[in-house]
Amino acid sequence: MFPRIFGHEAGGIVESVGEGVTDVAPGDHVLPVFTGECKECPYCKSAESNMCDLLRINTDRGVMIGDGKSRFSIGGKPIYHFVGTSTFSEYTVMHVGCVAKINPEAPLDKVCVLSCGISTGLGASINVAKPPKGSTVAIFGLGAVGLAAVEGARIAGASRIIGVDLNASRFEEGVNTPYFTIHGVIFVVLRSSLDFLFSPCSARKFGCTEFVNPKDHTKPVQQVLADMTNGGVDRSVECTGNVNAMIQAFECVHDGWGVAVLVGVPHKDAEFMTHPMNFLNERILKGTFFGNFKPRTDLPNVVEMYMKLCWRSCPPTTARGRRCWPCRRGSSRR
C-alpha cells in the first residue's frame, strides 16, 4: 500500500485531540506505539498478554480504524499510514489507544527509543525470560534490542551474561545502533538526537560479562555455550530474527529448567526445526511481542524507571553516569 509515511519509534507532544478523546489532552507528552492497548478486549484484560485484539500491529492497514480513511494527502490524493504511527513526519494522527502518556519531565529525545526497540529487549528479559538472581543468560544479537535485553538480565540479577554475535567489536568497542527515527509524533515535530542514537555503545558496558563469536568455533554455538555453563544456560534471549540463531538459542538452554525467548522476526518462509526431545527434556520455548509490555499501562512506568536511574546516576555537576542508557552512550543530559 503506497505511497505511505513510514516510521514507528518516536516521542512527541499532543497538539490536538478528536471528539470523545479523554485520556490525553493538548500539551501532554506521549510515546507512540505501533501496537496499541484498547483496554477492553480479552487480550488487554488478560495479565498474560499485550496483543490487543483491536490495535495490534498491522503492516497492511494504511488507514484509520474508525472511518477507514487516511489523514495524510498530497495534491488531493491519499498518502497511507504505517503501523498506525507514521513518525517520519512533523505531524501525525494516531488512535488514542496507540499513545502512552508519560512524565513531561522525561527528555523526549532520549525516551523515544522506549516506544519500540529498547522496551522490546528489556521486557523480553524481565517480563518473559525472568532470569533468577545468580543465573546465567545468553543474549543472541548485540544490536540495540540485544543491548536492552542485556540490561534487563543485569537488572534481574543474572551473574553471567554471555553475548553471542558475529561482530566481535560489539562486545568491547561498541557499534552504532541502527536507529533512523525522526522524533516528531502526535502532532508536533521534535528535534532529533543523533549524537545519542548513533553513539557507539559496547555490550560490556551494559552488563555483558562474556562474549562468544560463533565464527571462532568449529562446534555449534549451542554446544560451545553448554560446555561453558555445565550443560546449558538458564535463560536465553534471541534478538536477531535469524531462524538459525533462534534454534541455537533454544538448544543452548539447560534441560530441566532452561527457558529460551524469541524476540526477532524471521523471514516469512523460515522454518524452526529442532528435535522433539528438546521439549520432552523440559526445555521451554517462548515468544514475545514488544517485551510483553502493555503500552499505555506499562510504558509510563518504564519511563519512570529510566528517570530514576538517570537522576541517581547522573548528578547535575557531571551530567554523566554509568547506569542509564543515554549517559552510558556519552550523551549529555538535558
Image: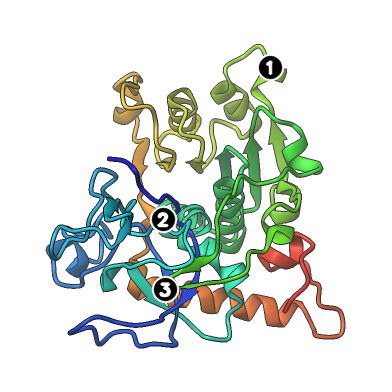
* Residue type marked 2: Gly
**Neighbour tally class for label 3: few under 14, some 14-19, many 20 plus, Cα within 10 Å:** many
- The numbered dot on residue 41 is none
Percent x, y of residue 191: 62, 69
Front-most of 131 and 32?
Answer: 32
Badge nearest the viewer, 1 or 3? 3
Res. 291 mark: 2
Callout 3, which amino acid? Phe
Tell me how far mark 3 sits from mark 2, CA to CA.
Answer: 26 Å
Residue at 42% x, 33% y is: 255
Which of the two residues, 165 or 252, is positioned nearer the viewer here?
165
**Farthest front residue in view:** 75
Residue marked by disc 3? 187
- Residue 194 at x, y percent in the picture: 69, 58
Q: Quadrant of the C terminus?
A: bottom right
Could you classify mark 2 by the number of other residues whose Cα lies within 10 Å: few (under 14), some (14-19), or many (20 or more)?
many
Mark closest to the chain's N terminus, 1 or 2: 1
Callout 1 environment at 10 Å: few (<14), some (14 to 19), or many (20+)? Answer: few
Distance, label 1 to label 3, CA atoms, is 51 Å
Q: Nearer the viewer, residue 68 or 139?
A: 68
**Residue 248: percent from the left, percent from the top?**
49, 26
State the residue in front, 111 or 135.
111
Question: Which amino acid type corresponds to the residue marked 1 in the rendered image?
Answer: His
**Badge 3 element:** loop
Q: Which residue does the numbered mark 1 point to in the structure image? A: 217
For image coordinates 50% across by 40% down, the residue present is 239
